[in-house]
Amino acid sequence: MDNNEFEQLSSLWQSTEKKPQPHMDKLLKRHKRQSAILKFNVCFEAVAILSVCYLLADAFIDGKELFKLSWIGFVTLWAIVIFILTGKSRLDSLSQLKSENINTSLEVHKNLLRNEVYRWTLYAKGTWVFILGFGLFNLGRCYSVTCEVKDLTLEGGLLLGLLFSIVFYKYKNEKAKEVLQTLEQ
């Protein structure tokens, strides 16, 4: 290798774009904000699950028709499964946020981001399952009872809202993956 080739190789190596490393203070601020959101979500979802369980028990006691009882049972089961799966991830994240290593260890931040990606993925998949159940129960209801246009427009609006939430979950998932990828490089 002559000097000219060496200089060209050296200039090529020096011209590669260096990616900035994430600042720990930005990561700490992001995860502290996430901690408050995690705590709020745990409390809010626990109250929502208790409300749905109360509705299921009330519908069962009142002797509601089987169709309504099965819908409320599906929603209750769906909510409990999602709550348990996300709750485990949230508790793991909250315990890592209390760790003394959070100020110095990038591995803790990577684990927190992996948990966040897992939760966003779970929310999106869980919403798809809910949409599937929602559609099946509405088709069954329309098959057994006549459907009115105002009911269909309301349910269409709810379906659009659920689809918008999936887009939001995918967006947040991609953002978390970008930050995780930056940390892993």
Image (cartoon, rainbow, N blue to C red):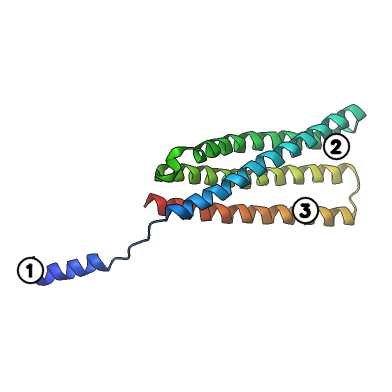
- Label 2: element kind: helix
Crowding at mark 3 (Cα within 10 Å: few <14, some 14-19, many 20+) = some
Q: Residue at x 8, y 65 (%)?
A: 1
Q: Residue furthest top?
A: 61
Going by the image, does 116 lie left or right of 146? left
Q: Residue at x 79, y 55 (%)?
A: 156
Q: Residue at x 77, y 53 (%)?
A: 158
Rendering quarter of residue 160: bottom right
Q: Looking at the picture, which amino acid does disc 3 mark?
A: Leu
Q: Is residue 59 above or below residue 34?
A: above
Query: Depth check: 145 or 131 in front?
Result: 131
Q: Which residue is mark 2?
A: 68
Query: Depth check: 93 or 178 in front?
Result: 93
Q: Which residue is mark 3?
A: 158
Going by the image, does 178 lie left or right of 130? left
Q: Which residue is mark 1?
A: 2
Label whose residue precedes the other's in the sequence (2 or 1): 1
Going by the image, does 53 lie left or right of 122? right
